[in-house]
Amino acid sequence: LRRLVLVLGDQLDATASAFDDFDPCRDAVWMAEVREESTHVWSSRIRIALFLAAMRHFATTLRELGRPLHYVKLDEPGNAGSLAAELRRAVQRLRPECLVMTAPGDWRVLDALRAEAARLGLPLEVREDRHFFCTVREFAQHARGRKTLRMEHFYREQRQSHGVLMDGAVPVGGRWNLDAENREAFGPHGPGPVPAPVHFEPDAVTREVLALVAREFPEHPGELGSFTWPVTRAQALILLDSFMQHRLPDFGRWQDALWPDEPVLWHSQLSAAMNLRLLQPREVVAAAEARWRAGGVPLASAEGFIRQVLGWREFVRGVYWTRMPGLAAANALAAHEPLPAFYWTGKTDLPCLADALGQTLRTGYAHHIQRLMVTGLFGLLLGVEPAQMHAWYLAVYVDAVEWVELPNTLCMSQFADGGGITSKPYVASGRYIERMSSGRFCAQCRHAPGQRTGPAACPFTTLYWDFLQHHRERFRRHPRLGAQVRHLDRMSPADVAAVQAQAEALRARNRQAHDLAGAAGE
Ligand code: FAD
């Protein structure tokens, strides 16, 4: 055998660089389902099932293309359980001259495979990942000499160099960013009819995977009963088309809105398909721009959506690869509280949190504002250790892969890098959730978002004021947060002390619940 081409679970693209010059007479492909990828964080069963089902469908595609494939199933006798150990077994059997792969998304995986190739004495060629608009080297050039990185600068460069939503040298409509038009709430009558989600009935291959995951990972979080994610490129294209037709037109307006029992609203749910490489960001961005150019989609929607894919998605990937491995240990705010045990069960008396956590465990999905301004916000205000937040986000979402999850969690949501990519921490009181859900969660809740102390105080609000007090000196002169911090100066010392005592009681209760859950083996 000349080359063994390594394909990981999130590299399901038959046109990837690893296949350049592939010769079916002399080369072969290797794919392996290994336990370690589902247990290094306590992965949700939905996430495991999605990866395995998509891998098995991609194996069929490769066979149809006539590419010889060595595929190891999770429950195959002798499966060594980790990528490195399985690779060793494959190399001993197949004796390739060299190994080739497209650059993996995870630092940990690249490190492990490089080390294993070195142990085996085999050259490992790691090729550019063409999936992205921006290469890691181009991002490093962008980052060079900048103390802090801002998505907006990067995004404008990307728009210009790829000619996206441009009128010659100027942005279409005269503005780069229509974020100010992406922040509406629904009002008291709610969202009205929301487009029906697209469901993909599990076929025989996926049903076999669902049974396997139920059998092999009985203790893991996440429910398997309502699995309807796209697992093939053909399905991903159907989801893309449906989003473009039914959701994109209103995506911009409702991008930041929240509503109980509405898990998707006008979001695309395309992240998992893109992260598995079933879809290319270029085709997603081109489809959104084409819709706008054809009329019928407001610019605030097309631009708002494209900003997420061409801007944020590419930006966080660059941040990951230029700041790892050190970034994983960042904890600028010295946060050391344990992750609330209810993040694994959804059982809390705060309806906003229960809603976001419940749908996460049921479906493996939550939209951005639920992740950032509900579950992320609560962790940040409570002072949860960033590494524990990271392990949770990496475990529970179907789109969770480290290059995108880690910078979002550590930098954007938990401010653990001290402002390397965001100008201020995303902190808010319960009033934010009240406003963005038009009061709907708070109406069902025994806590009052306007109260910071006393039995009816909203924990978000108590913890928000405590956060500002705790980090008072750090943020006093901050251009955007300073005014809120200086508000503390107008509070009496007794008021401030009451906030601190109530916040400490919330933390003590959290530690106790954590210890109890640990003792019960949850
Ligand atoms: P839409 O709202 O429809 O957005 C369109 C697309 O833009 C998404 O599919 C996604 O590819 C991209 N996008 C949007 N926001 C971001 C962002 N902040 N960073 C990168 N890409 C973005 N996204 C992941 O793909 N995987 C993760 O593991 C992940 N973890 C996150 C953890 C936290 C704490 C936070 C705050 C955000 C995280 N995100 C993650 C980003 C974002 O929340 C999800 O991409 C989005 O919610 C996916 O749903 P959607 O496809 O319906 O997105």
Image: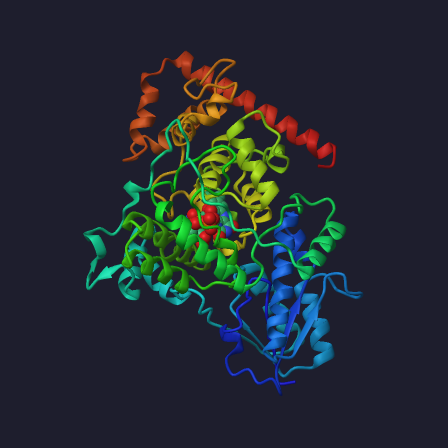
Q: In the displayed image of the protein, which residue is found farthest to the bottom?
A: 25
Measuring from the top left, give residue 12's x and y in whole percent. Answer: 55, 66
* Rendering colour mode: rainbow
On the image, which quarter does residue 390 sit in? top right
Task: Tell me: 44 left or right of 434.
Answer: right
Quadrant holding the N terminus: bottom right
Task: Tell me: 228 left or right of 205.
Answer: left
Q: Is residue 349 above or below residue 151?
A: above
Measuring from the top left, give residue 507's x and y in whole percent. Answer: 56, 26
Measuring from the top left, give residue 163's x and y in whole percent. Answer: 28, 64
Quadrant holding the C terminus: top right
On the image, which quarter does residue 34 sit in? bottom right
Viewer-side residue, 20 vs 108 = 20
Tell me the residue at 55%/44% (across/down). Answer: 387
Q: In the displayed image of the protein, which residue is found farthest to the right?
A: 77
Instruction: Tell me if I can see residue 147 in this picture.
Output: no
Tell me the residue at 74%/33% (across/down). Answer: 520
Task: Tell me: 290 left or right of 499.
Answer: left
Instruction: Tell me if I can see residue 322 in this picture.
Output: yes
Measuring from the top left, give residue 265's x and y in whole percent. Answer: 45, 42
Tell me the residue at 52%/69% (across/down). Answer: 13
Q: Is residue 512 above or below residue 124?
A: above
Viewer-side residue, 160 vs 211 = 211
